[in-house]
Image (cartoon, rainbow, N blue to C red):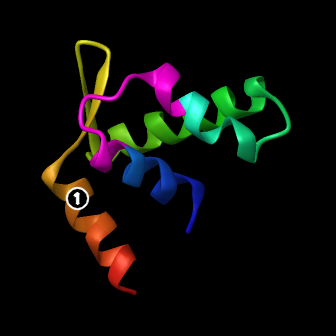
Amino acid sequence: MTAKNAILLIIKQSPGIDYNSIVAKIASNYGSVNSARAALSRAIKDMNAVGLIEKRDNRLFATEKGQIQIRSEMKS
């Protein structure tokens, strides 16, 4: 599973999760917290651009398109 898919899964499982909570969950996969923040920022920017997630009041939510994609990835 790619980093984007892992982040999308976290957002789908915890609707309305904030940025810092996701950083805390993925930080152990990176050499430093700053590396985790950089990777998360890139992933969020990319996923938001293609409509997989949306930000509302500094909270992240998976869109219908994002939920369909993660379901598809989980099946394969």
**Residue 62, x across and y down, in percent:** 24, 44
The answer to whether residue 45 is left or right of residue 61 is: right
Is residue 20 shown above or below 11? above
What residue is at 45 percent from the left and 36 percent from the top?
44
Q: Which residue is mark 1?
A: 67
Q: SS for tag 1?
A: helix
What residue is at 75 percent from the left and 23 percent from the top?
34
Residue type (three-letter) at the residue carrying disc 1: Gln
What residue is at 38 percent from the left and 22 percent from the top?
18
The answer to whether residue 36 is left or right of residue 60 is: right
Is 64 covered by the magenta stretch? no
- Residue 59 shows up from this direction: yes
Q: Quadrant of residue 30?
A: top right
Residue that extends furthest to the bottom in the rendered view of this protein: 76
The answer to whether residue 5 is left or right of residue 70 is: right
Is 21 covered by the magenta stretch? yes
The answer to whether residue 31 is left or right of residue 21 is: right
Residue that extends furthest to the right in the rendered view of this protein: 31
Quadrant in which the N terminus appears: bottom right
- Residue 41 shows up from this direction: no
Magenta-highlighted residues:
11-22
Is residue 3 shown above or below 17? below
Quadrant in which the C terminus appears: bottom left
Which residue is nearer to you in this view: 5 or 52? 5
What residue is at 23 percent from the left and 12 percent from the top?
57
**Residue 33, x across and y down, in percent:** 75, 26
Which residue is nearer to you in this view: 25 or 66? 25
Report crowding for label 1: few under 14, some 14 to 19, many 20 or more residues within 10 A (C-alpha): some
**Residue 46, x across and y down, in percent:** 45, 42
